[in-house]
Image (cartoon, rainbow, N blue to C red):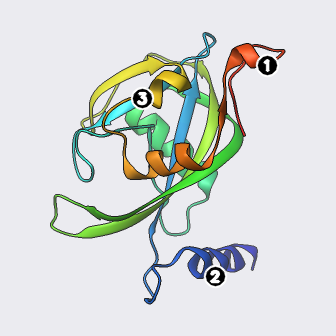
Amino acid sequence: MLIKSRSIIFYMLFRKPGTRERPLLIVQAMIRKNTGEYLAIKRAESVEIGCWEFPGGRVGPGETIEKAMGREIKEETGLKVDIERFVGWGQGFGIKSTDGGAYDRFVMFFECKLIKGKLKLDHETADHKWAALEELMQFKPLSKPVQDFFGKFMVVPPEMLAGNKTVIR
């Protein structure tokens, strides 16, 4: 019952205005190393080719957000991470796909701590960089949902915090 309620709430809140269409639900992991740098990937296929974003992907039917996150991170990076917290969301409307369609994407961003593993990128990734969030915000071009996320949530630089960790508020 709880899952069905969440689906109805998601549908009502995030459907395309004036239609019964729902955007694709995507999860992305902001994977952080001990150095405080985050993994950014450049898309190689499907949608927003050449844009920078975080590793992740679509939540499948009947799949929990946690399962989708674990599956996508393993497929795309080969890394093991701990999901620490939900940090925000971003939306992208009318995103063109190589299959000729246009999609709306609702992306949930989670901060994750890198636990172990050797980075092994899959065919969906053209390039990658480890960078501080402040630097990452300047990458060009950023995917529409990542631009929306950075526009909604403030990134507090480490030098302003007692523990020298970047925080998203």
Residues 63 and 29: in front is 29
Taking depth in this image into account, of 119 and 55 the one nearest to the observer is 55
Badges 2 and 3: C-beta atoms under 8 Å apart? no
Image quadrant containing the C terminus: top right
Disc 2 residue type?
Ile
Query: In the figure, residue 13 lies in which quadrant?
Result: bottom right
Real-space Cα distance between discs 1 and 2?
Answer: 39 Å
Q: Give the side of residue 21 with respect to residue 34, left or right.
A: left
Residue located 47% across and 83% down the image? 17
Q: Which mark is residue 8?
A: 2
Q: Which residue is mark 3?
A: 138
Q: Of the two numbered discs 1 and 2 on the same chain, state the one appearing first in sequence.
A: 2
The answer to whether marks 1 and 2 mark residues whose Cβ atoms lie closer than 8 Å is no
Separation of residues labelled 2 and 3 (CA atoms):
36 Å
Does residue 94 lie above or below 41 as drawn?
A: below
Is disc 3 placed on a helix, strand or loop? loop
Q: Which image quadrant for residue 51?
A: top left
| Residue drawn 47% across the image and 31% down it | 137
